[in-house]
Amino acid sequence: MAGSIGTVGVTDRPVFLLDTHALYWYLIESPRLSAPAARVFEDARAGKAVLIVHYIVLAELYYLLQKHQCPELYASILQRLEGSGYFRVEAMEFAEVRDLDNYPEIPEMHDRMLVIAANRLGATMVTRDQSIQTAARVPYLW
C-alpha cells in the first residue's frame, strides 16, 4: 500500500497494535469500543500515538465484513486507513513464525501472531481478548 501506510520505525510516541474488534468498532463508531481504546484513536489522530494494523487484522476484517454481509465496505476501509495518516500496516516477519511454539498459552493462532508482533514492535495491544490479557505476554489496554 502506498501513501502514509508503512512499517513502524523508531518513534518517541507510544505504539499500539490493534486487534480486529478494536479497529472494527472504531470504524463503525460502536459503543462497544472501550473508553481507553477510544482515547488511543483520539491520541493517534492528534499525532500523539502510532496505530499498527497488522496484515492479520486486515484479513480478519475482510472475513468479518463478509460475515456481516457488507463486503463492499472493505475497499473503502482500506482507503480510509491509507488516507488517515495515523495508521501503519505491519507484516509478520519470518522470525516470528519460528516463535509460534513459544506462546502456547494463547490458543488462537491469529491472536498468537498479533502478540508476537506486538512484542517485536514494543507495542501495547488494544484488545478485549481474554486469552491475550490472561497470558500477560504483552502490555494491553481495553
Image (cartoon, grey):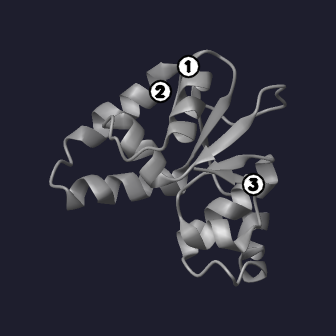
Say whether residue 12 is left or right of residue 73: right
Say whether residue 7 is left or right of residue 23: right
Give the CA distance from mark 1 to mark 2: 13 Å
Can you identify the residue that label 3 sits on?
139
Q: Secondary structure at mark 2?
A: helix
Amino acid at circle 1: Arg
Q: Nearer the viewer, mark 3 or mark 2?
A: 3
Residue 56 point in image, percent of width and height: 52, 57
Q: Is residue 93 visible?
A: no
Question: Circle 3: is it few (<14), some (14-19), or many (20+) Cα within 10 Å?
Answer: some
Q: Is residue 9 depicted above or below 95 in this figure?
A: above
- Earlier residue among tags 3 and 2: 2
Amino acid at circle 2: Glu
Q: Nearer the viewer, residue 103 or 30?
A: 30
Please report contact status of discs 1 and 3: CB closer than 8 Å, yes or no. Answer: no
Can you identify the residue that label 1 sits on?
45
Q: Is residue 36 depicted above or below 81 in this figure?
A: below
Give the CA distance from mark 1 to mark 3: 22 Å
Give the CA distance from mark 3 to mark 2: 26 Å
Of the numbered discs in the image, which one, if any, rests on residue 116? none
Can you identify the residue that label 2 sits on?
82
Q: Residue at x 41, y 37 (%)?
A: 26
* Residue at the front extreme of this rendering: 35
Q: Nearer the viewer, mark 1 or mark 2?
A: 1
- Earlier residue among tags 1 and 3: 1
Residue 101 point in image, percent of width and height: 74, 83
